[in-house]
Amino acid sequence: MTDLVMEARNVYKNYGKLEAVRNVSMQIRKGDIKLIFGPSGSGKSTFLRCMAMLTMPDKGEIYLGEQCLTKPGVDLNKARARIGFVFQHIYLFRHLTALGNVELALRQVLKLPKEEARARALAALKEVKVTECMNKYPNQMSGGQQQRIGIARAIARNPDIILLDEPTSALDPELTGEVIDTLRDLAKEGTTMLIVSHEMPFAREVAEEMIFYDEGSIVETGTPAHFFDSPHSERAKKFMTRIINRTTRE
Amino acid sequence: MDAWQELIFLLEGVPLTLSISIISFLAGIAIGLPLAFIRAYENEVSFVVDAYEKIFRGIPEIVLMLLFFFGLGLYFPFPFGNAFFVAAFVLGLRSGANQSQIFRGAIRGVGDEQMIAAQSIGCSKWQAIWHVMVPQVFTFSTPGLGSEYALLIKDSSYVWVIGGLAEIMTRSIWLKNVPPYDVVTPFVLAALLYIALTFPIAFWLDRWGNKRKKKIGL
């Protein structure tokens, strides 16, 4: 049981009448790569933000290792430092260079000495293959480069898990490839990841488990093969057909 | 006195005009910046900030100066008997109220996402504000800060009413009252000096801000 990295237990989150997260539970073990997919507006991103406690769940518990994050009095900043988060719209710090973006947490949160922070930031930039942009501001980079910096910012402090919220869906199709390549590299290294994505070929390749999420809750879980061949629920069947058609048309 | 001598006499008031304005401007930043963040992120106490802004934006600074210098100065000669202190105090508080509004607009312009992104890497709220929001908020505020500075240069002329501070306005009134009792030249010269003090800095701040904004895509 000690290899449990994160766990959600009966998590709920409402926005007014909209039930974005309804009794969702999930366990993620070390080295797991899980992929959440489902219609837009179904609450996937909200659930992911609840996992990182960037959005407070209304009910239920979130565990990071043994620590319950939803109890009052928990140092959430310390917890978030152990969780990497990659945003759909990237949200790099606009006033900092690529290197500055990656270094900020190392210097201010982990309080590493200057040289060590610099070395680790450079290593992270190398890992996502954007060292050539290290002195550029986000505004001077392509979307694909920006998102890879976003990933570098998330992995530089060696978090226990990386949560990725549709990391490619705000990018042009020709730029998604380079981000997917980066994620594939992370997968190969055994990085624990929970990814919201509709990149089906990628899912098939790296995900151990796919989670079909609709109307605030988990409808069906299974291996990629299960979903590609014969999902049980009607909704998942329909969704898979639509997504596979779209992918082949492209 | 000829116009040349008058100009030199007025120019000697420039350091005082500048020091009153710049000290109030800096005090305004020190007051306005935290207030703007309190109003943006701490709903429970934002009504206090709101009241402060309404009071200091609503009362003419000339009234406040008279009130503090002659009213409070009577009972608390230290520090309210000091004309320079009262000038910087009143203008600084008023500027704080203005700047709080300028910065609040900038916080909105920079956007909540930057705050969330900073918290996602483990920053505390305070660290996120200091390392991520403040630098961008300043860039975003430059046009507003430029006109606030110009406003302070102009409003420093009100200190004439409390007397004892030989800045540009006080000096031009002195000139009017001595032979040859010229009522035109001193004020024309004062007007030109005020333009010379406000325009270049406001212009430079605006241009620097626009350049920087373009660079970081704000």
Image (cartoon, coloured by chain):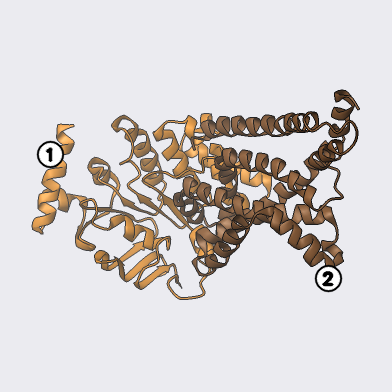
Residues tagged by mark 1 and mark 2 found on one chain of the structure: no
Pick the residue in front: B77 or A245.
B77
**Mark drawn on residue A230:** none
* Residue occupied by mark 2: B75
* Few, some or many residues within 10 Å of mark 1 (<14, 14–19, 20+): few
The subunit letter for the residue under badge 2 reads B
Give yes or no for contact between labels 1 and 2 (Cβ–Cβ under 8 Å).
Answer: no
Please indicate whether residue B46 sits to the left or right of residue B25 in the image.
left
Residue at 37% across / 72% down in the picture?
A61
Q: Nearer the viewer, residue B190 or A70?
A: B190
* Residue at mark 1: A245
Residue B46: percent from left, percent from top:
53, 65
- Name the secondary structure under disc 1: helix
Q: Is residue B81 left or right of A136 when viewed as pictured?
A: right
Find chain A in the image and tell me its colour: orange
**Residue A188 sits in quarter:** top left
- Give residue A25's quadrant in the image: bottom left
Q: Amino acid at mark 2?
A: Tyr
* Distance of label 1 from label 2 (alpha carbons): 83 Å
SS at mark 2 in the image = helix
Residue B189 against residue A158 in the figure, above or below: above
Q: Which chain is brown?
A: B
Identify which residue is drawn at 80% across, 60% down. B69
Residue B11 visible in the shown view: yes
What residue appears at the point 39 percent right and 48 percent down from the top-left corner? A87
Tell me if residue A135 can be seen. no
Question: Does residue B180 appear left or right of residue B127 in this picture?
Answer: right
The three-letter amino acid code for the residue at tag 1 is Asn
Q: Measured from the top left, where is residue B127 in percent x and y?
A: 59, 56
- Dot 1: chain letter: A
